Amino acid sequence: MPYIKPDSRMKYQEGIDSLLGAFNETDELKVGDVNYVVSTLVWELFKNKYSYTQANNLIGALECVKQEFYRRMVVPYEEEKIKENGDIG
């Protein structure tokens, strides 16, 4: 769950802002670059604690990120498009 306390977020914010700045240097989102950054972070976290438990925890975190992104960001977008363009059938 990404909803950590505000004081816990502060230690990551500068790095996140730096990454977002790098991604926003161009109008086109380079999905390969996003994949590289996320993959590097996950791989390094796994190397730091090389175990099945760590692998399972990281896979679980990635799955939850995917699901929460879909639920909070994609579903509202799709609902807006249904209203705008009409539903299927």
Image (cartoon, rainbow, N blue to C red):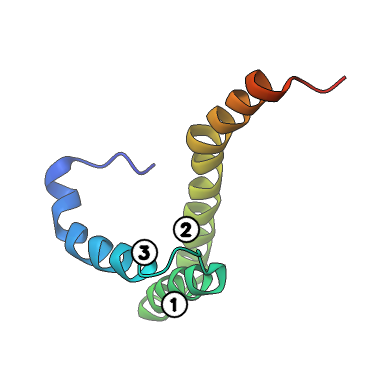
- Of the two numbered discs 2 and 3 on the same chain, state the one appearing first in sequence: 3
- Of the two numbered discs 3 and 1 on the same chain, state the one appearing first in sequence: 3
Quadrant of the frame with the C terminus: top right
Residue furthest to the right in view is 89
Q: Amino acid at mark 3?
A: Asn
Q: Amino acid at mark 1?
A: Thr
Report which residue position mark 1 lands on. 40
Report which residue position mark 2 lands on. 57
- The residue lying at 64 percent from left, 28 percent from top is 81
- The residue lying at 38 percent from left, 73 percent from top is 45
Query: Which type of secondary structure does the marked residue at label 2 adopt?
Result: helix
Q: Circle 1: is it few (<14), some (14-19), or many (20+) Cα within 10 Å?
A: few
Report which residue position mark 3 lands on. 24
Circle 3 or circle 1, nearest the eye = 3
- The residue lying at 17 percent from left, 49 percent from top is 8
Coordinates of residue 33 in the picture (x, y in percent): 49, 74
Between the residue at mark 3 and the residue at mark 1, the CA separation in whole angstroms equals 19 Å
Circle 1 or circle 2, nearest the eye = 1
Q: Amino acid at mark 2?
A: Asn
18 up-or-down from 83: above or below:
below
Could you say which is closer to the camera, residue 77 or residue 62? 77
Coordinates of residue 36 in the picture (x, y in percent): 49, 76
Could you say which is closer to the camera, residue 84 or residue 20? 84
- Of the two numbered discs 1 and 2 on the same chain, state the one appearing first in sequence: 1
